[in-house]
Amino acid sequence: MPVPRPDQSAVTPRRLLRDVVYEKMLAAVMDGTIELGERLNDDELVAWLGVSRTPVREAIAKLADQAILEIEANRYTRVTAPSYDEFVDTVEVGYHVWSLYAERAVPALTDEQLQFVLGVLDARLATFEAREGEDPVALDDMNATLLQAAGSPSLVRLSAASGPRLLVLVRRAAAAGHFPWEQAEAFTRALRDAFAERRADEVGRLVREQPSTWDDFFEAVRASGLYPERG
Amino acid sequence: MPVPTPTVAPEPRRLLRDVVFDKMLTAISDGTLELGERLNDDDLVAWLGVSRTPVREAIAKLADFGLVEIEANRYTRIIQPTEDEIEDTIRSSTELRALIARRAVRVMTAAQRKEFAKLAKEVRATFAKDAGAYPLEFQRIIAFLVAAAGSPALTRMEQTVGARAALMLRLLSGRTGWTDGDAFTDRLAEAVAAGDADAAFAVFDQAAFSDVDDYLAGAQD
């Protein structure tokens, strides 16, 4: 009998099954396996994920609260298809929430955590300079570190409610060939320096103001019709 | 077998889990479900007259809203906030409200500005009669600003922490009344009347950074 290989997504003690399912579904929306606006059915999801209906419903509920999915009647679920205004709104609010916990984290980061953050930002800068997409796992780890240092359960909640949708919508635009490369480079460089010097105010300001430097990017996205304008 | 009497009837187009969520939220807010109280699926199913699934979905949402704690395979209970948690919630929700206020004032119509002036007057009048009423009146102000902001993202952010923040404020005000509710309302009314979005932001932002301890200290008098 073959030796079972350890499955990285296996439920470990105390890890809720609904969270494992949630992460799988989120990844599928981010990488386009599931498209924006696509309609999903409970039975299909149960078959794909190999779990019972309950954790699927719970994951759907969470993704619906994050406005990534919309629950419809009769066990159908639809991936949201935001308008252009909703896209801009998501970006502005998402970055503002990010600025709150990034700023709060600065004085509280241990030297080790700070080195980790700087490492992620350096790597991020390199990928942007090469006009390549950043490593989403590294960004997630960095933000998890910042949230932990910030020590605010409320900001964890606000981040969970705004971050995933922000990521999905920006990634989707990037997949369609739209991304503010120059601004991302400048931002990452300045942010790295601000963190290195432990300048909390500056970190907060840089993050908060990032969307306001994205006029060209927003215009390109608007013109593409990826997120349709609504009357 | 007795026919279960539905005590919760979903309105047209309203998901059952949302109806259950609202019922439980009310029960937490008014103390029917006590802080720290353990939740039992069977009891909830019996009380609400629904199946396990909407109950579990509502609980999951309450957990995301920071009103319920789930310890997998151990217990599910209503939160029992510590002083640190109260301070964190108030500080973070105030930072969020600053953003909401700025967006609201930026997009508000003249008619809405008038409406807000009227609301501010009502709040002050209620507060003058009953200082303990401020948390509830404050919620009316927040609700107005959230609606006026017209931002789906901000509305969702408010939903994430608002109920928890309201609960915390009620806990605090249970100990004493608020001393600076008038000044706060006045400053906000001024900013709205002037259409000054940045000033509206500052009213909340300054409250956030002028020592949250004041809130807690004021609650200890």
Image (spheres, grey):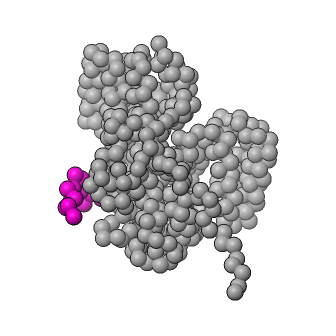
Residue under the point 63% across and 39% down: A151
Residue B159 % position (x, y): 41, 45
- Please state if B7 lies on the left or on the right of B37 as rendered: left
Furthest toward the bottom, the residue is A1
Residue B136 percent across, percent down from the top left: 33, 29
Residue A227 lies in the magenta stretch: no
Residue at 68% over, 63% down: A135
Please give left or right for residue A164 compared with residue B138 in the image.
right
Please tell me which residue is depicted at 43% across the width and 78% down the height of the picture: A44
Q: Nearer the viewer, residue A146 or A209?
A: A146
Determine whether B50 is above or below B127 in the image: below
The C terminus of chain A: image quadrant: bottom left
Q: Which residues are magenta?
A: B1-15
Relative to B32, say whether A69 is above or below.
Answer: below
Report the front residue among B190 and A42.
A42
Which of the 4 image quadrants contains residue B112?
top left
In which quarter of the view is residue B145 placed?
Answer: top left
Is residue A172 visible in the rendered structure shown here? no
Please name the residue shown 36% across and 54% down the image: B42
Of helix, strand and loop, which mostly describes the magenta segment? Answer: loop
Q: Quadrant of the N terminus of chain A?
A: bottom right
Q: Hey, which residue is sitting farthest front in the picture?
A: B1
